[in-house]
Image (cartoon, rainbow, N blue to C red):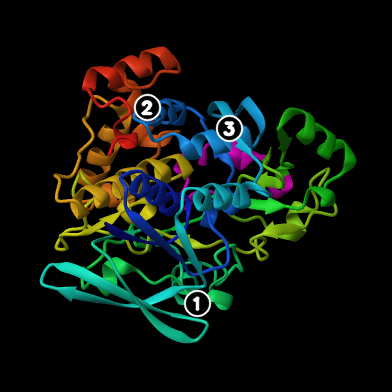
C-alpha cells in the first residue's frame, strides 16, 4: 500500500502514523521546512473536554502524539480562565521530537514540497506532482490524505484580515497553502460569521525575555499569568473574530492572559504594541509570532473539504481529510483526532476494506459527525467547534461525554468494541 499525506501539521503527522501502522508505505509532503504547522506556536493540550478526547484516543490505540506532547510538557494540570487541567508543551523543541518519531517508524518526509497538480482517473486520484529543488516530481499512491489546513495564502489574509502578519506559516518563503481537495476539482467550504469570511488565529507569542523579571518569574513558576488591562486601554485587543471561540470570554478581554509554552503565549489574536507596552510588566514587549502581532494574525477556515463521517472527501473515492480541512474544528487535539481517523481510513481504502466511522458514544465520534452536519447549514458555518469550550464543549456536557475519569473513558471505548483499533492492521 502506498499512501501520501499532503501537509505536515499535527493532523498530517497523525495521519502518517495511523497509515504506517496499517502496514502502508507512507510519504508525507510538507511545503515548509518544519512539521507541526500552527503547532509550532500553539502548545495547549488536555484542557476541558480535550482531556476526554485524548484519553479516548489513547484507548483507541491512537495515543502516540499525545504521549510525546505529555512527555514534553512544561506545565501540567494548570487552570486559566474558563479552562481546567491543561498541559502546556514546549513549542521550542516539539517539532524535532515529532520528526524523530516519524522517521523512526519509517515514514518518508519530503520538505519544501509544495504540490501543484493532482492527476485523476475517474473518481480516484492516482498521483500528485510537486516541484522539489526546482525539479518537477510526480508521486503515485493508492490513497491520499489532505491535511493542508485552511490558512492563507497572503492575498486571503489581506482580503479578509489585516494583511500578512508574517506568521509561522511563512507563505512569502515557501508559497501559500495549496489544497489537494481543490486540485482534485472539489469545491471547498468557507467559514462565515455574518458578512465576515474566515476567522483570525487565536493567539500570539511574546519573547519571554521582553517581559519584566517579576512577570517572567510568575509565568515560569505557575505556567500562567493574568494581568489586568488598565481601563484607559481596555478594548484594544478585539477577541470577537477569534477562531478559538473557547477563549473569547470576558476575562480574555479585560486581562492580558499569558501561558508558558516555551515562549509567552498571549491569548489574544493581536494587540497594538504601543498599547501593550503601557501595561505593567510589558514595557519592553516584543512579538515572536506573528511578527506583526501588534496589527493582526493569520486568517483561517478559508477552504474546508466537504466530507462524510469517515472523513472521506465528497466526490473522490480515495481522498481523506484531517485537521481544519475536515471542518470547523479548532485545536491540536482535534487535528490529531481527525488526522488519525483519516490516515487509518486511507490505509483501509488502499487495502480494499470498509472505512471506519467512530460511534457517537465517543466524544471523538460525536464531534466529527456533529461538525460535519453543522457545516451543511449556513448557521453552523458561523461557529467554531472544539472539545475545550464554546458550543461543542457545552454539547459534550449535555450528552454526558465529558469526564476526566480515565478508567471510565477506557470502559466507554471498550464497550464500543474498538479498543486499540488504530494499532491493529
Q: Which residue is drawn at 26% across and 56% down?
A: 1
Q: What element carries label 1?
A: loop
| The disc label shown at residue 56, or none | 2
Q: On the picture, is 201 further left or further right than 402? A: right
Q: Does 200 sit above or below residue 64?
A: below
Residue 253 can be seen, yes or no: yes
Pick the front one: 84 or 380: 84
Instruction: Assess whether mark 3 and mark 1 are in contact (beta carbons under 8 angstroms).
Output: no
| Mark in front: 2 vs 1 | 2
| Residue 250 seen in the current view | no
At 56% from the left and 53% from the top, the residue drawn is 99
Q: Name the residue under label 1.
A: 175
Residue 115's spot in the image, x, y percent?
39, 75
Q: Residue furthest right?
A: 213
Residue 409 vertical placement versus 129 (above, below): above
Q: How far apart are marks 2 and 1 (CA)?
A: 36 Å
Q: Disc 3 or 2, which lies upstream in sequence? A: 2
Stretch of the chain drawn in magenta? 232-256
Q: What element carries label 3?
A: helix
Q: Which of marks 2 and 1 is nearer the N terminus?
A: 2
Residue 88's image quarter?
top right
Q: Position of residue 22 (x, y in %)?
A: 30, 45
- Name the mark nearer the viewer: 1 or 3: 3
Amino acid at each position: 500500500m502506498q499512501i501520501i499525506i499532503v501537509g505536515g501539521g499535527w493532523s498530517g503527522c497523525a495521519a502518517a502514523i495511523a497509515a504506517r501502522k496499517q502496514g502502508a508505505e507512507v510519504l508525507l509532503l510538507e511545503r515548509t521546512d518544519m512539521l507541526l504547522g500552527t503547532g509550532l506556536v500553539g502548545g495547549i493540550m488536555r484542557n476541558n473536554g480535550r482531556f476526554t478526547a485524548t484519553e479516548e484516543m489513547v484507548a483507541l490505540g491512537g495515543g502516540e502524539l499525545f504521549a510525546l506532547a505529555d512527555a514534553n510538557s512544561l506545565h501540567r494540570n494548570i487552570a486559566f480562565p474558563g479552562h481546567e487541567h491543561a498541559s502546556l508543551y514546549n513549542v521550542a523543541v516539539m517539532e524535532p521530537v515529532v520528526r524523530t518519531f516519524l522517521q523512526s517508524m519509517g515514514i518518508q518526509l519530503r520538505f519544501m514540497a509544495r504540490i501543484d497538480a493532482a492527476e485523476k482517473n475517474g473518481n480516484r486520484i492516482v498521483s500528485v506532482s510537486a516541484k522539489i529543488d526546482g525539479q518537477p516530481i510526480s508521486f503515485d499512491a493508492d490513497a491520499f490524505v489532505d491535511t493542508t489546513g485552511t490558512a492563507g495564502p497572503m492575498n486571503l489574509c489581506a482580503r479578509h484580515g489585516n494583511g500578512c502578519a508574517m506568521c509561522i506559516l511563512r507563505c512569502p518563503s515557501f508559497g501559500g497553502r495549496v489544497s489537494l481537495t481543490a486540485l482534485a476539482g472539489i469545491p471547498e467550504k468557507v467559514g462565515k460569521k455574518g458578512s465576515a469570511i474566515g476567522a483570525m488565529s487565536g493567539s500570539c507569542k511574546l519573547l519571554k525575555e521582553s517581559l519584566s523579571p517579576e512577570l517572567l518569574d510568575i509565568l515560569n513558576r505557575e505556567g500562567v499569568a493574568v494581568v489586568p488591562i488598565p481601563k484607559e486601554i481596555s478594548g484594544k485587543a478585539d477577541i470577537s473574530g477569534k477562531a478559538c471561540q473557547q477563549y473569547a470570554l470576558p476575562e480574555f478581554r479585560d486581562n492580558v492572559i499569558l501561558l508558558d509554552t516555551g515562549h509567552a503565549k498571549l491569548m489574544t489574536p493581536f494587540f497594538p504594541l504601543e498599547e501593550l507596552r503601557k501595561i505593567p510588566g510589558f514595557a519592553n514587549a516584543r512579538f515572536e509570532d506573528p511578527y506583526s502581532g501588534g496589527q493582526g494574525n493569520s486568517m483561517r477556515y478559508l477552504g474546508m473539504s466537504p466530507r462524510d463521517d469517515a472523513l472521506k472527501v465528497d466526490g473522490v473515492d480515495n481522498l481523506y481529510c484531517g485537521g481544519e480541512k475536515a471542518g470547523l474544528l479548532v485545536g491540536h487535539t482535534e487535528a490529531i483526532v481527525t488526522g488519525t481517523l483519516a490516515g487509518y481510513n486511507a490505509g483501509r481504502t488502499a487495502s480494499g476494506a470498509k472505512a471506519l466511522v467512530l460511534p457517537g458514544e465517543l466524544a471523538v465520534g460525536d464531534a466529527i459527525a456533529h461538525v460535519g452536519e453543522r457545516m451543511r447549514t449556513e448557521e453552523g458555518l458561523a461557529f467554531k467547534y472544539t472539545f475545550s469550550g464554546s458550543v461543542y464543549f457545552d454539547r459534550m456536557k449535555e450528552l454526558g461525554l465529558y469526564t476526566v475519569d480515565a478508567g471510565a473513558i477506557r470502559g466507554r471505548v471498550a464497550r464500543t468494541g474498538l479498543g486499540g483499533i488504530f494499532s491493529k492492521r
